[in-house]
Image (tube, rainbow, N blue to C red):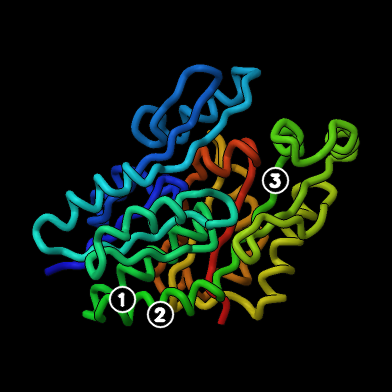
Amino acid sequence: MAIRILTDSASDITQAEAEKLGITVIPLNVSFGDTSYRDGIDLDHFGFYSKLIETDEFPKTSQVSPYEYEEYYTKLTAGGDIVLCITLSSKLSGCFQSANIAAEEFEGRVFVVDSLNATIGQRILIEMALDLINKGLSIENIVEKLEEEKNYIHLIALLDTLEYLKKGGRISAAVATAGALLNIKPVVSVVGGEVIFLGMARGSKNGNNKLIELVKKENGINFSKPLSLAYSGHSRTLLDKYIEDSTSIYEDYIKAGNALPIHTVGSTIGAHVGPGAIALAFFAP
């Protein structure tokens, strides 16, 4: 009897990565107008940003239904295995609710954890779960540990533009226009499962300094636990510049022979932040 991890594509774990990790990723649906795509299957991360830039249609994502979760639970538990389902934040989507509704028919065989996070914040909780499984912990102990540790996850991001927050109705057109004229870069985070504004920075250099400042404010990064960096869009130039500017944070980690884990932001969060964003997720000490 094994513990099988199930998550959704808001984690930005691609299908290829999922296969290597030995986990299962349910795709959310992302729609441009009347055309719907399965996130990560019909439309990969780079394809999503191509469509985002090319079309005037603002994309919409839809949660995974209880029926879909039930189908996956049935398949994954058929051989007697246990399912650990880690979902996108319940404050951002109904996936957690759907996963719980479906789990009612699988008592003792399916356990659901609300990540209270998204994208790489959700990813590093999944990576911790994999580590705990490999250490041989029971499903009850794993769930208890994840519920505790998720409170120490910090996801912070620097956006390149306010345009997509405007399109999504998060800010007014006037604020977006003023921000563009002043080269304002918003800094956001996920706190308590919700996306919040942490501040604004003039230009990418000041934005990088803001990210460095926020990491130090949390007493640094716990490098003994999973961490991840990510970028949205087609280019990682801005992320590479951030890494260069924050050498002091990662220097010892890299010198120890570790490569910084770099991933891409997909459609669920990418629809609201647009291309050119960079993000960092880590566990605080």
Q: Work out how far the residue at label 2 is from the one at label 1, CA to CA, in angstroms.
A: 9 Å
Disc marking residue 159: 3
Of the 4 image quadrants, the one containing the N terminus is: bottom left
Whole-percent x, y for residue 26 in the image = 34, 44
Q: Given the image, on which type of amino acid does mark 2 rest?
A: Lys
Residue 76 versus residue 124 in the image, above or below: above
Disc nearer the start of the sequence (2/3): 2
Disc 3 is placed on an element classified as: loop
Which residue was labeled with disc 1?
132
Q: Given the image, on which type of amino acid does mark 1 rest?
A: Leu
Residue farthest along the front direction in this orientation: 105
Q: Given the image, on which type of amino acid does mark 3 rest?
A: Leu
Disc 2 is placed on an element classified as: helix
Residue found 36% across the figure and 44% down from its top: 14
CB within 8 Å, label 3 to label 1: no
Which residue was labeled with disc 2?
145
Query: Which corner quadrant of the image does residue 84 belong to?
Result: bottom left
**Label 3: few (<14), some or many (≥20) within 10 Å?**
many
Query: Which corner quadrant of the image does residue 182 belong to?
Result: top right
**Label 1: few (<14), some or many (≥20) within 10 Å?**
some
Disc marking residue 244: none
Closer to the camera, 42 or 85? 85
* In this picture, residue 68 sits left or right of residue 236: left
**Label 2: few (<14), some or many (≥20) within 10 Å?**
some
Q: Work out how far the residue at label 2 is from the one at label 3, CA to CA, in angstroms.
A: 32 Å
CB within 8 Å, label 2 to label 1: yes
Q: Work out how far the residue at label 3 is from the one at label 1, CA to CA, in angstroms.
A: 33 Å
Residue found 26% across the figure and 73% down from its top: 133
Closer to the camera, 94 or 135? 94
Closer to the camera, 251 or 151? 151
Disc nearer the start of the sequence (3/1): 1
